[in-house]
Amino acid sequence: MDANLTQHGTGNSMMVMKTGSGWSRGLDNAVRGELKEWFQTRTWWSQVLIWAASINLIFLIVSLSVRQNPGEMNSPTESLMIFNIFMGLVGPIGVSIVMQSAVVGEKKSGTAAWVLSKPISRISFILSKVIGNSLGIAATMVLAQGIIAYLIAYFVVGITPPPLGFLAGLGVHLVHIFFYLTLTLMLGAIFEKAAPVIGIPIAFLFSQNFLSSAFPKLTPFMPQSLAMPGNNSSELPLAMALMTESPVDTYLLLIGTFIASLIFIGIALWVFQRQEL
Amino acid sequence: MEWVIDTQGLTKSYKEVDALKALNLQVPKHSIFGFLGPNGAGKTTTIKLLLGLIRPTAGTAKVFGLDTVQDSVAIRSRIGYLPQDPRFYESMSARQVLDYTAGFFFKGPRAEIERRVEETLDLVGLQGKADRPIKGFSGGERQRLGIAQAQVNYPDLLILDEPAASLDPMGRRDVLEVMDRLRKYTTIFYCTHILDDVQRVSDMVAILNKGELVAHGPIAELLAGGEGVAYEVRLKGDTSSAYQCVAEQPWVNTIQVRKQNESTIWTVSVSDPQIAENSLFRLLAADEKVIVTGYHIKEHELEEVFLRIVEGGNNGR
């Protein structure tokens, strides 16, 4: 191919053809493309604003109310639960909406077929969606919202959550949201229409309350328990426990949720490898 | 001969429908290969099979001697592809699309990749709009961008699905010029409905109909085949006796007659070109009631051949 470059008169000996045709072919370029889409367009700040309005605006309103009426909650630290509940609720819904366009949207629009006419493996295509969107969501939906929430807690509520514990709590939210990200990705690989791709994760999100009520023994296995208090459960969700330095019984649910996410990625890869575009 | 594309019994079925039936197709290196057929004939299916976007139900396809199922990524690293309806990421600009595309093929200094992107923009005349988001592009501009991204990697094989669609006559001319210029570096395999373009630039043609290959070969052979030699004669005056005289000749197959203004135009199909060359004009000139105002051997148009083959079933094979 170098000879070919010379033939075309570029006179360029520095630019060389990439070689190799393994599973990771095209991954670097595809991830770069995803990250540009997140961070070199208005996407990142519009996402930060949307999630700030959906999560932290309510936290701010509640915090202002707690400040004016200190008796409303047992302790000011409890107001952090509002942030955790909204992260646990809005995060999965938001990520399902964002991610539905990642695979099923591209299959429908034809951009997936266009990209896959270039030298990129299907594994790289799917992994670029996972990596790019995870980083985008981690930055705009988790980290940025965490920083805003921390500032609200410090300046409005008047508490100083332990920084490392708070960061660990955000990590739990990230795992929780990652579960929905990979679930949506997998459904995007399986289905050709957007409705089930958005609908199933959201239905699963809301059905956990019902399942938790009907079968209390299932509660410890619900990913929701990472971020939000379950029905009839006196235990703090893991994220809240870490943010307030409360005792943590087990990390099994966290590990299980992460493993489930990896399984979703595996299924997405398997399905997409066999898919006709 | 070295084949860039070689398919053997390539078949693609969807449930009950056979989109492609046992295609045996060979595309020689450095040819401009026109791949023709009515809508739904299986052209795009064939292209998708070559690119590894779909899998064959039966048969094999090799590109550069590599299997399209097993070695798809290696094949795609040497191909440029323009889809029929090019779709790119709408938020990107033309420059970003080309930069993104080039990133799949090249590594090296940014400046060199940017220079290649500039060259490609220049080739398709999109420099002025290089930094605008493509969501505002017209159909013709998208098509130009599609052509640009297809050849940013100096492909050994350029697969173009309707490259001149949505282009104005100047754009069409430019595309044909680009294709002609690239001929010495690359093989071009393209689908189109604009048969005039195929006749102008292609050296090989295949015609697909209802998933079956119904004609395949050098364009000159295809144009010469079928009806054999025919003369087109333009006459004025009373042609009845001349018609009777010519029709009686044993080397005349058929005479098609049509009127145009004051003239009568005959298409005389002959079985023996040598005798016809010596005798036909003399017979007409000998009749004092007619004046011969035009006389030439008829050159078949690809459109006629195409319609005859497609509408006449598989007889054109």
Image: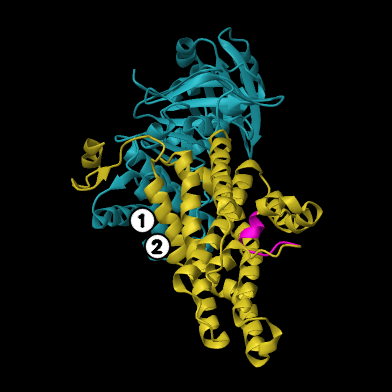
Q: Chain of mark 1?
A: B
Residue type at mark 1: give it: Leu
Which region of the structure is painted magenta?
Answer: A223-231
Q: Nearer the viewer, residue B179 or B201?
A: B179
Tell me the residue that label 2 is attached to. B130
Q: Residues within 10 Å of mark 2 (few under 14, many from 20)?
A: many
Quadrant for the C terminus of chain A in the image: top right
Magenta highlight on residue A201: no
Secondary structure at numbered mark 2: loop
Q: Which residue is mark 1?
A: B121
Q: Which chain is yellow?
A: A
Colour that chain B carries in the picture: cyan
Q: Is residue A224 magenta?
A: yes
Asked whether disc 1 touches disc 2, contact meaning CB atoms under 8 Å apart, the reply is yes
| Real-space CA distance between mark 1 and mark 2, rounded to the nearest whole angstrom | 7 Å
Tell me the SS state at disc 1: helix
Quadrant holding the N terminus of chain A: top left
At 50% from the left edge and 80% from the top edge, which residue is drawn?
A160
